[in-house]
Image: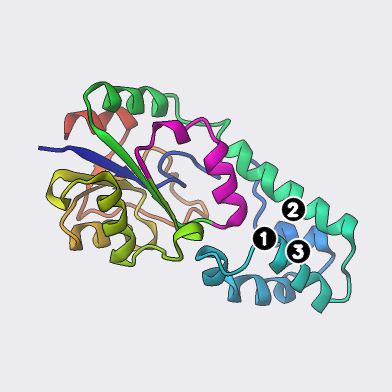
């Protein structure tokens, strides 16, 4: 019996690949910094950005200052474009995401969220149309933990007050999240409704997990 469903956010409830991309390469261009030099600092700080040790503004200031090209105008341009790119993801939801969440609520199923995210993403998630549906939220930037650390899965279970065997985890499969969910005793299934073959999306189909082709398919396995 499933009492709770915990979701991943990116490439599960929302996708970044239906909007214009604004990742390191695009930021480097706007910064006027060679991409390799930009990425050297940006990627090295990924874990710290994910677990709340450094914000978007702080890492950008470091990159721009290191490359002797800091200006408030340039900084604001990049920050605003990055935030807008993340906000836009919530404007391209799969048409069945909200109906699925509503259906789970109607059935009395608790809904959790575990997301590896950066400062700007944590802010946007909390303001999003999806946020009110969650009964428990564990954002890596806020909690200082990231998937696949079992501790963040256990934290979400504690917030929901549900034992692992009564919980279903749904994610696109990045960060070894499905494997980690199973390790702590949850059932796990892969969301593939946003997955597009032959793209730069980070995840691929994982045949060892049940694959859900559409959000409403979740209702068939709870």
Q: Main secondary structure of the magenta part?
A: helix
SS of the residue under disc 1: helix
| Label 2 crowd bin: few (<14), some (14–19), many (20+), radius 10 Å | some
Do residues under tags 2 and 1 come within 8 Å of each other at their CB atoms?
Answer: yes
Q: Is residue 126 above or below residue 174?
A: above
| Label 1 crowd bin: few (<14), some (14–19), many (20+), radius 10 Å | some
For image coordinates 35% across by 28% down, the residue present is: 101
Percent coordinates x, y for residue 162 in the rendering: 19, 46
Q: In this view of the protein, which residue sits in the foreground, 117 or 154?
A: 154
Location of mark 2 (residue): 79
Percent coordinates x, y for residue 123 in the rendering: 59, 47
Nearer-N-terminus badge (3/1): 3
Q: In this view of the protein, which residue sits in the foreground, 127 or 183?
A: 127
SS of the residue under disc 2: helix
Magenta stretch bounds: 118-136
SS of the residue under disc 3: helix
The Cα atoms of the two marked residues, 2 and 1, are separated by: 7 Å
The C terminus - image quarter: top left
User: Residue 110 has which mark?
Assistant: none
Nearer-N-terminus badge (2/3): 3
Percent coordinates x, y for residue 61 in the rendering: 77, 68
Q: Nearer the viewer, mark 3 or mark 1?
A: 1
Location of mark 3 (residue): 28
Q: In this view of the protein, which residue sits in the foreground, 107 or 206?
A: 107
Location of mark 1 (residue): 56
The N terminus - image quarter: top left
């Amino acid at each position: 019996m499933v009492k709770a469903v915990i979701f991943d956010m990116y490439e599960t409830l929302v996708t970044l690949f239906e909007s214009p991309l604004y990742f390191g390469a695009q930021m480097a261009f706007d910064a006027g910094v060679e991409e390799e030099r930009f990425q050297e600092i940006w990627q090295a700080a990924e874990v710290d950005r994910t677990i709340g040790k450094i914000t978007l503004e702080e890492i950008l200031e470091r990159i721009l200052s290191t490359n002797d090209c800091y200006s408030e105008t340039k900084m604001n341009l990049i920050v605003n474009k990055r935030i807008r790119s993340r906000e836009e993801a919530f404007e391209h939801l799969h048409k069945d995401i909200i109906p699925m969440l509503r259906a789970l609520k109607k059935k009395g199923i608790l809904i959790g969220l575990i997301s590896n995210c950066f400062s700007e993403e944590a802010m946007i998630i909390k303001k999003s149309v999806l946020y009110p549906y969650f009964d428990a939220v564990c954002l890596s930037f806020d909690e200082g933990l990231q998937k696949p650390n079992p501790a963040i899965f256990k934290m979400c279970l504690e917030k929901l007050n549900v034992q692992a065997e009564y919980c279903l985890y749904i994610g696109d499969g990045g960060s070894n999240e499905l494997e980690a969910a199973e390790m702590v005793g949850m059932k796990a299934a892969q969301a593939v409704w946003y997955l597009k073959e032959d793209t730069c999306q980070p995840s691929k189909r994982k045949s060892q997990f049940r694959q859900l082709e559409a959000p409403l398919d979740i209702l068939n396995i709870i």
